[in-house]
Amino acid sequence: MFRRCAVKLNPYDVVVIGGGPGGYVASIKAAQLGMKTACVEKRGALGGTCLNVGCIPSKALLHATHLYHDAHANFARYGLMGGEGVTMDSAKMQQQKERAVKGLTGGVEYLFKKNKVTYYKGEGSFETAHSIRVNGLDGKQEMLETKKTIIATGSEPTELPFLPFDEKVVLSSTGALALPRVPKTMVVIGGGVIGLELGSVWARLGAEVTVVEFAPRCAPTLDEDVTNALVGALAKNEKMKFMTSTKVVGGTNNGDSVSLEVEGKNGRRETLTCEALLVSVGRRPFTGGLGLDKINVAKNERGFVKIGDHFETSIPDVYAIGDVVDKGPMLAHKAEDEGVACAEILAGKPGHVNYGVIPAVIYTMPEVASVGKSEDELKKEGVAYKVGKFPFNANSRAKAVSTEDGFVKVLVDKATDRILGVHIVCTTAGELIGEACLAMEYGASSEDVGRTCHAHPTMSEALKEACMACFAKSINF
């Protein structure tokens, strides 16, 4: 009782519901700007899906399995013999993943203490726009009074109505990260980022992986050249199979396997049987138990919270960021930027997110990274553009280390030379895309980048050469 009265006498400036990439960043930034801040997170560990069961654990498994696959497939070309005898201890791989996750989530909790953010472990819900009920993981209930609230509850995997997740044979991304052994066969429904990354993890370890995609091509939002290069590399190097323009029409969980009925664009049906089924057909906003209906927060037809240009919802003093909102891609780094901007706005400062310069990365091998417009988008918008392209088989560093798959593709405005989009396929695409983002944020032309000296020999020279191909001609291709 005393705790509730004390909070009422001295309410929080900001309460953030959700401790994922958007929520924890918003909490820290708000506290740094002098606001009395609390964060409510029901998982019991900070970092949200990304740190706990998403971006971070998947990268740990992708790295480990890449090393294993590289030893078997490529060591001999460097004169390193015996790589085909390397074995994988799946349990130790999972332990390393958990150590990484625990270290990072613990680090966020330390940052809360450092910045004086009050952390409530429990489920937060609205009683009113300025009162948040916390059902603690310890069984206690508390009522927090707040001047402003930020909803940052993220998203959850979408399941098929006829094949609910059991995380044993019918898997969400969470279950696919924690398999105790390598399945002999795996079917992936959905050839997007999650499906391709996690399918790749288990394909490298020996699973026969088939990707079923409803669209005519995998990762359909990416530039078509990029998709074709990526799918070709995964088919060649990791023996993954792809069934595009194919819909799932039914399925049965047999307990130790799944029977999946699919239909191709020609109308022919067939049944696929697998030991593990990964369902990666998208994610939906998580708003269950929040009490949004109680205070009448508006949502769109898909359940996303509607926000304005300053992250405000339909209710005064209630804001929302991240995967739960109807704006921008569902990406951790987008949520982080929104967290900073929203906190700045609540502190009376200018806050801004440039939704046109948010990179997207697929961490397969090779990696894929894109920012800005694709060629298809520019065609549909009627924009006159030029293309500059440079392959990594003409890049000195890539040649030296035998990582020649891929290219850099730069799209520029035909009249002004301003960079409109950059698309990269290579082993380090996720690291290279940052330069393209910076260039686009500052409105750079291809000539700006092409005339900037890049270290030699580096993979980054391919971006320079692709830019040179836009405004003049590349030198090395």
Image: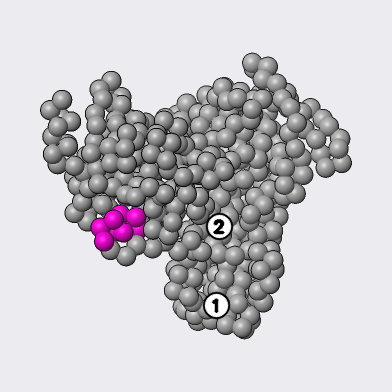
Q: Which mark is residue 131?
A: none
Q: Tell me the magenta residue range.
A: 341-348
Q: Is residue 343 magenta?
A: yes
The amino acid at mark 1 is Arg
Looking at the image, residue 414 lies above or below residue 26: below
Residue under pointer 2? 369
Q: Nearer the viewer, residue 192 or 335?
A: 335
Residue under pointer 1? 418
The amino acid at mark 2 is Ala
Q: Main secondary structure of the magenta part?
A: helix
Q: Nearer the viewer, residue 238 or 44?
A: 44
Residue occupying image coordinates x 75% and y 31%: 249
Q: Nearer the viewer, residue 407 or 258?
A: 258
* Residue 421 place in picture, x, y as percent: 57, 67
Q: Earlier in the sequence, mark 1 or mark 2?
A: 2
* Residue 222 place in picture, x, y as percent: 63, 56
